[in-house]
Image (cartoon, helix red, strand yellow):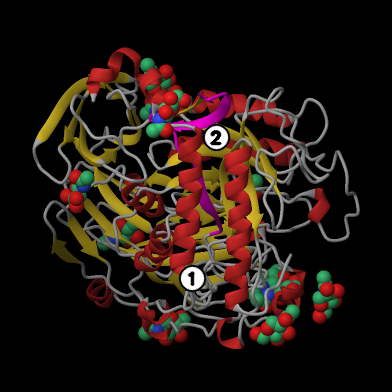
Amino acid sequence: MHLSIGILSSLLATTAVATSNSRFFKRQGYNSTDYVLKQGPLDTPWTEKVGTDPWPEYPRPQLARSEWKNLNGVWRYQNATGFSELNAPPFGKELELPVLVPFCLESALSGVMGNHTIYSWYRTTFDVPSSWTAGNRVLLNFGAVDWNATVFVNGHQVFNHVGGYFSFSVDVTDQLSTNGTNELYEILFVFDPTDMEGYNIPLGKQRLVPSHIFYTPCSGIWQTVWLESAPANHITQLDVSADMYGKVNVTVHGSGNTSSIVQVTIYEPHSTVAKVTAKGRANEPFIFDVDDFDLWSPDSPTLYNMTVKMDGDTVQSYTGFRTISSGEVDGVPRPLLNGDFVFMFGTLDQGYWPDGLHTPPSREAMVYDLEVLKSVGYNMLRKHIKIEPALFYQACDEMGIMLIQDMPALVDGYHIPGNVCHDTDDVKDEASQKEFERELALLIEQHRNYPSIVTWMIYNEGWGQERKKEYPEFRLTDMVKSLDPTRLVDSVSGWHDHGAGDFHDNHHYSSPQCGTPFYSTASTPYNPSQDRRIAIQGEFGGIGNNITEEHAWKVKASIDAVNGTYELDDTIEIWNYRAHHILKELEEQITLFACSGAVWTQTTDVEGEVNGMMTYDRRLIRMDKDQWKDDIQALYDAAEKRGNSTMRMMARGDDLDVL
Ligand SMILES: *[C@@H]1O[C@H](CO)[C@@H](O)[C@H](O)[C@H]1NC(C)=O
Ligand SMILES: *[C@@H]1O[C@H](CO)[C@@H](O)[C@H](O)[C@H]1NC(C)=O
Ligand SMILES: *[C@@H]1O[C@H](CO)[C@@H](O)[C@H](O)[C@H]1NC(C)=O
Ligand SMILES: *[C@@H]1O[C@H](CO)[C@@H](O)[C@H](O)[C@H]1NC(C)=O
Ligand SMILES: *[C@@H]1O[C@H](CO)[C@@H](O)[C@H](O)[C@H]1NC(C)=O
Ligand SMILES: *[C@@H]1O[C@H](CO)[C@@H](O)[C@H](O)[C@H]1NC(C)=O
Ligand SMILES: *[C@@H]1O[C@H](CO)[C@@H](O)[C@H](O)[C@H]1NC(C)=O
Ligand SMILES: *[C@@H]1O[C@H](CO)[C@@H](O)[C@H](O)[C@H]1NC(C)=O
Ligand SMILES: *[C@@H]1O[C@H](CO)[C@@H](O)[C@H](O)[C@H]1NC(C)=O
Ligand SMILES: *[C@@H]1O[C@H](CO)[C@@H](O)[C@H](O)[C@H]1NC(C)=O
Ligand SMILES: *[C@@H]1O[C@H](CO)[C@@H](O)[C@H](O)[C@H]1NC(C)=O
């Protein structure tokens, strides 16, 4: 864009929108007149409402600063040929196409709807609000970029980040001009080797050639990009846990590594009245007690706001008081929430959208899925081999939805087209294993503050799991437990179980085999006299019901794959009838055997899969809501009969008076 400074600054004029406690600077459109929403294979009721100012919410609710500027909106994009282009980045040049950030390049909402977008350039310009305090630092934040992002500001390479599901923050102050000219730009080079020869990266369900249970990939920026202002020694990370006894454990990480005094204030819910103020030192854990509080649970998801101060920096956060553990209730190993056995019933939740792929079209759309599930009584979701934006976890915290959070899988040797190696020792690539482990640690470090997450899941159905001794899940389970001793670990969900972790997790379609003495040959039997782990059904259900063209992902390969569904039911009535019987089977297994939780496949249809509670476009709810509500309540009732609050009293012991 060759514009004089005068035109540029009017294009980039900022408007401050005052809210109660934050100053949010709205970014004006950047050459957005040629952005056009693409017609994808299917849309949702929210697609048309996205406009060119998507995801305006502050994106990091557990470390929120008041002075910030959203950089979402129309940027420019250009396909690149390879790493060699890094030798001559297109500084000062306009890139070919408009792209709507934060929607990945393959999505209709991005306006690109690309394919094979392996190397990409992104460019935008921005200015820094003149009111931001001189002497403060300017931080450039990315919610997530899939997979390897190299960031340039004003012609300087400032950062390189690898990992498609994680946030990162770059201090760009030194790259900003100090001469009063606000012509700043940022260029991003992204490398996303989905299914590329020589690469096996954590990517979940993304495939270059989608096929039934594998879907369209998602490359590039797919979460909010924003700027914020912070003092030189600022808070970079908070580690917070709060348990059922009122013990709060906080580590405030500061950019300067100093042992500055930090102050944490916890407020009464929905109030500005301070409940507790505690002081400690930065960069080391400190622990304090809170009295007279309400526990967090799915039925009563009470949260407490907090303010954290360090030197001149102040951030907002929140926490919830709850304890996850395992224990025996009437002789059966159970997951315990606040000392009670709570039967966990959830859907397999993939988090895919026909218009935005990995990115929901809006927060409202994202919350709609959760509301539909909650309305029939689901109290849990298995967030399936994908990691969501922070606002998703905040919504689960607020709504009372427990989460089993999966690590995004590598590609399994078994599933690589043309690879006929079906049995053990599929995964020989040590570099991929190391990267999987590095990103697994990032998953825990970036998400362990959310009260809603109750369990980490490492390997799904053996994908990317080395199947020879020493089985990697033992080492990885130890790693996860050392990074986060406050949660349970589901080391392998389905197949190739060698006894690691807290769960015996079976997958079976369509009927469950949950903690039962009968099993299919792909799994292992659950024998409570030998296995003291908790038995759950990590996947079952999956019955399908084909859809009319208006709700279908209109891609021939996907429509052709519908016949790969485990079971197709002719009508929605028959689908509901079948679901009722499958849920009754699960209920019996709770009553008779050792079943402690289960995951129904799945929240919505996804591309060629037609087995959702809702269709992929969210326009049709398949569930007969009253029937599902009754059947789900019957599961909780059956579980309640097997174990009640006795455990809770025992677990609390001397602390009974706390509550
Ligand atoms: C936007 O950029 C494109 C590509 O450089 C250019 O063709 C177009 O005229 C620009 N539009 C505006 C409104 O500046
Ligand atoms: C991008 O460039 C690569 C390498 O030159 C090429 O293989 C690919 O087809 C291009 N993709 C698009 C969408 O133009
Ligand atoms: C990531 O990109 C950088 C370029 O900034 C490159 O040097 C590095 O090798 C890439 N790493 C991977 C694992 O692709
Ligand atoms: C101000 O600084 C920027 C980058 O640091 C530079 O490109 C620009 O030419 C400078 N402008 C003046 C008027 O010195
Ligand atoms: C992308 O290309 C692959 C072939 O490499 C093809 O199978 C797939 O259908 C294409 N996707 C789209 C959305 O065109
Ligand atoms: C407090 O949390 C840190 C991790 O942030 C952990 O290392 C430490 O053991 C915890 N302390 C207690 C008493 O739970
Ligand atoms: C702070 O400590 C970390 C880990 O020890 C180190 O990587 C980082 O460079 C240090 N930062 C500063 C500003 O000293
Ligand atoms: C936390 O603070 C936000 C912003 O002031 C407010 O909207 C929200 O209701 C508060 N939540 C709780 C649990 O106090
Ligand atoms: C599913 O429905 C589509 C129309 O939406 C149709 O083209 C396809 O043949 C059907 N597949 C099966 C297996 O019934
Ligand atoms: C589904 O149909 C496709 C062609 O429409 C065929 O190639 C494939 O074998 C069928 N699969 C099953 C499981 O019937
Ligand atoms: C709770 O469990 C205890 C011990 O198993 C049992 O005696 C009691 O009757 C149970 N209470 C209810 C309400 O089910």
Q: On the picture, is 62 further left or further right than 97?
A: left
Q: Secondary structure at mark 1?
A: loop
The quarter of the rendering in which ligand 4 is drawn is bottom left
Q: Is residue 655 one of those drawn in magenta?
A: no
Q: Quadrant of the N terminus?
A: bottom left
Q: Quadrant of residue 464?
A: top right
Tell which of 88 and 360 is nearer to you: 360
Which secondary structure lies at badge 2?
A: helix
Quarter placement of the C terminus: top left
Quadrant hosting residue 313: top left
Q: Nearer the viewer, residue 242 or 187?
A: 242
Rendered location of residue 573, percent (x, y): 58, 76
Whether residue 165 is visible: no
User: How many numbered badges does the structure rendering display?
Assistant: 2
Q: Residue at x 36, y 76 (%)?
A: 52
Farthest residue, direction right = 420
* Sequence order check, earlier mark of 1 and 2: 2
Q: Which residue sits at x=78%, y=25%?
A: 470
- Specify the quadrant of the image occupied by residue 123: bottom left
Q: Which residue is mark 2?
A: 441
User: Where is mark 1, residue-wise?
Assistant: 624
Instruction: Indicate the position of residue 424 as horizontal and vertical percent values.
Output: 86, 40
Q: Mark 2, residues whose alpha carbon is within 10 Å: few (<14), some, or many (≥20)? A: some
x, y percentage for residue 295? 29, 34
Residues in magenta, as a range: 328-350
Q: In the displayed structure, does residue 404 sit left or right of residue 653?
A: right
